[in-house]
Image (spheres, rainbow, N blue to C red):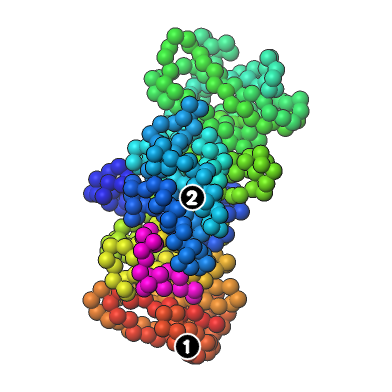
Amino acid sequence: MKRNGMCPICYLKKLFTRPSRVTDLYSDVEYDNGAAQTPPMGWSSWNTFKNNIDEDLIYETAVAMKEKGLADAGYRNINIDDCWHSSLRDENGEISHDLTRFAHGMSALVEKINALGLKAGIYSSNGTLTCEDLPASLGNEYKDALTFARWGFEYLKYDFCHNEPISRYAPIVYGIEIAKLGEKEGKFYPCTDGKVSGLAKFMPDKELPCGYKVSGMDACRGALEYNNVYAEEDGKYALTVCVRKKGLYEKALMVQVNGERDYMLDIPKQKFWNVTARFQTVVDLKKGVNTVKMFNPIGSRADSAMLQYRKMGAAVRAAAEKVAAERGEEVKPITFSICEWGFNQPYKWGASAGNLWRTTPDINPSWRWIKLIYEHNVKLYKYASPGHWNDPDMLEVGNGGLSRERNKSHFALWCMMAAPLVLGNDIRNISDEVLALVTDKDLIAIDQDRLGKQAKRLRRGLAVDVLARPLEGGRAAVCFFNRNGVFSAKASLDISALAKDEYVAFGKKGACRYREVFSGETGEGSRLSCKLGPDESKVFIIE
């Protein structure tokens, strides 16, 4: 496996390396585009077909989704993964479809998928190239998001291959200039009009117009702040950061206006034909006095990932709104799927950037690997909520020779964990057994429950895990999972434990009615008990 550009040993080493933590500096406003109020359901081309995809395969799969009842069960996203691209951007610099495998273009394919009552999803990467070394969207976020929206896509998986992190270094600043857009003259504010904090400091420099400069704003350890930036009226203004050139390395600067809006300036390596340089952005100012704060925001590698994903998330939302305005239609929100592989704890910042976030590296149809993914994802229950989901990756049900019990447990665990249910098998040739499992109404209802509370593992025994999650209508779901692949095991749970747990907070303590999902057996009592075969799961719905 070399899906993410590294050898398997390096891949595992990175997974289990102490993760980088996000600097506690930024606003955590939830990403709210109205999409994915329940975990997304659909199909993705990657697990089975990898780079061997074309428009016929995608459409045939959409037809099969409809004909086999999967759409009626809730699977409505047909997600095209990597390798739909041409290696060329078009004459306008816009990302382009493979000119032969998708010869009729993406808009035409999306229209055919929509005609079946389904939605289409697309793929790109938060890097210079995708995982298969095709054009990606880092540096072209809004341009590509607008292309995807105009094609009609309603889901974007955004990978992390070929990522180039934002520099931790800040430029040396000697002032800012503010001008109303369209006006030739602006007002210059020397750095000495501001105040410094942290490691930032004023330094004399005779070569500069104001005689001083500010350094020490690297790696989120210092800042320069103006509290006297005046605007004649509300509106958009050109903000020019005046820089003292230094260093043949890339730099970055965040500009915060009134503590509400963040604007990023990426500054390339600089040659020294001149002493100074100007870097601009367009900011929104309010009438009267404004505050402008500048610093480098990258205190850790996680900060870079977070800010880049937030940028694409904002671009996706803005693109959907722009296309709706162009066409005089209601906004079709684009579900934004962050595929960062879990290395930078995306569950801690993903809700401010998108609708779902991968918590682990890529899944594969190895039972040991599926259980490792489960072990990590099950601990993250507190981070899931409507519109924001932990994503342990696509389903491998029906792939790789998984046994009947392993398929059942895999699907049941993903449903208990409120995971996106994205099929990864060839559904044109899906077996009756697998079809019956992935369309199980009770399990899907648990996954799609509108409380949006991922299951908590109440107990991890020597062999058996006990998971529980609250459901709408005062109900609860309990799953017993035998992790042991050799021996059978017995398990039980006093229902009163569900009431005592603050997270599950089941409202009943005495005898309750319950039903086991797979067998359909019903009962009433204050205790659940069952016997589990190797790798087996049993799921109870309690009322």
In the figure, 388 relative to 102: above or below? Answer: below
Residue 101 appears in view:
yes
Residue 160 appears in view:
no
Percent coordinates x, y for residue 304 in the rendering: 45, 39
Tag 2 residue: 121
Q: Disc 2 residue type? A: Gly
Q: Residue at x 44, y 31 (%)?
A: 89
In the figure, 283 relative to 320: above or below? Answer: above
In the figure, 279 relative to 222: above or below? Answer: above
Q: Quadrant of residue 463?
A: bottom left
- Helix or strand or loop: what does disc 1 sit on? strand
Q: Is residue 493 magenta?
A: no
Left or right: 500 as drawn, with respect to 188: left
The part of the chain drawn in magenta is 424-442
Tag 1 residue: 522
Q: Quadrant of residue 479?
A: bottom left
Residue toward you, 91 or 128? 91
Percent coordinates x, y for residue 344 in the rendering: 41, 47
Magenta span: helix, strand or loop, mainly?
helix
Q: Nearer the viewer, mark 2 or mark 1?
A: 2
Q: Disc 1 residue type? A: Thr
Q: Residue at x 57, y 67 (%)?
A: 451
Q: Is residue 429 magenta?
A: yes
Q: Residue at x 43, y 18 (%)?
A: 270
Percent coordinates x, y for residue 279 in the rendering: 54, 21
Categorize mark 2 by other alpha carbons within 10 Å: few (<14), some (14-19), many (20+). many
CA separation, marks 2 and 1? 40 Å
